[in-house]
Image (tube, helix red, strand yellow):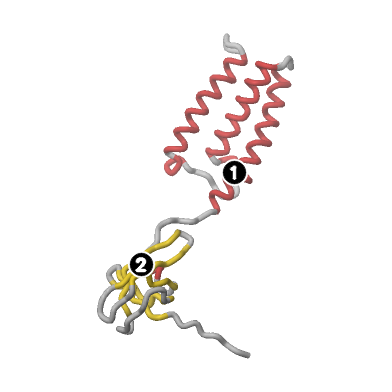
């Protein structure tokens, strides 16, 4: 085909699409034109499909005695299966995961924390807040102007200029 062996064509496509995939990894935010519900328009899916097709085609051309048409059909089926597995078990879960390491001071209001440096009457101490993002430590001051000892569970009432205004956490228990 075009004066080249089919093995050379498969290998060339594999190398070119591999380079395009690496470029896509770096520039995915700019090139991401996927439409929800239409995975065949997703560049990651298309690049992986072509990569799997050319890789399977190359290996079958190199190591089997089937005709080129049969090899292309086998490579196409293998690529369909591997791309579907990649899409449903890797790309969909990754896109639905919305965990971010970023947080705002306002998002900390209403959360419970623990005092690691005692909070004096009119001064600052330190608290830690355990969240999905990990452990966050913040400067703390007493909201009610009372001393808060070490290892006390506190509630963040509000955030003022990066300082957590905290009150001692009192868990209400209802009895029936």
Q: Which quarter of the image is occupied by the N terminus?
A: top right
What residue lies at 39% left-to-right and 75% top-to-bottom?
A: 156
Vertical side of 80 occupied by 64: above or below: above
What residue lies at 65% left-to-right and 22% top-to-bottom?
A: 57
| Residue at the disc numbered 1 | 39
Tell me where residue 79 appears, x and y as whole percent.
Answer: 65, 32
Q: Which picture quadrant has residue 152?
A: bottom left
For residue 25, the mark is none
* 1 or 2: tag closer to the N-terminus: 1
- Nearer mark to the viewer, of 1 and 2: 2
User: Along the horizontal axis of the image, is 48 left or right of 129?
Assistant: right
User: Along the horizontal axis of the image, is 163 left or right of 171?
Assistant: left
Q: Which picture quadrant has residue 112?
A: bottom left
Tell me where residue 164 appears, x and y as whole percent.
Answer: 34, 72
Vertical side of 114 occupied by 50: above or below: above
Q: Could you say whether the residue bearing mark 1 is in a helix, strand or loop?
A: helix
Tell me where residue 131 appears, x and y as whole percent.
Answer: 46, 64
Viewer-side residue, 174 vs 39: 174
| Residue at the disc numbered 2 | 105
Instruction: Check the image and name the residue furthest to the top.
Output: 3
């Amino acid at each position: 085909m075009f004066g080249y062996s089919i093995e050379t064509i498969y290998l060339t496509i594999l190398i070119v699409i591999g380079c395009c995939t690496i470029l896509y990894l770096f520039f995915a935010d700019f090139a991401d034109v996927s439409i929800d519900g239409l995975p065949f328009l997703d560049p990651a899916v298309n690049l992986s499909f072509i990569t799997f097709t050319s890789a399977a085609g190359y290996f079958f051309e190199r190591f089997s005695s089937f005709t080129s048409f049969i090899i292309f059909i086998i490579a196409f089926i293998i690529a369909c299966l591997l791309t579907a597995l990649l899409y449903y078990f890797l790309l969909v879960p990754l896109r639905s995961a919305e965990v971010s390491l970023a947080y705002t001071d306002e998002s900390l209001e209403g959360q419970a924390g623990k005092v690691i440096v005692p909070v004096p009457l009119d001064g600052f101490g330190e608290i830690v807040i355990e969240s999905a993002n990990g452990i966050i430590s913040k400067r703390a001051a007493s909201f009610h102007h009372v001393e808060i000892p070490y290892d006390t569970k506190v509630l963040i009432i509000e955030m003022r200029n990066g300082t957590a205004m905290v009150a001692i956490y009192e868990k209400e228990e209802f009895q029936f």
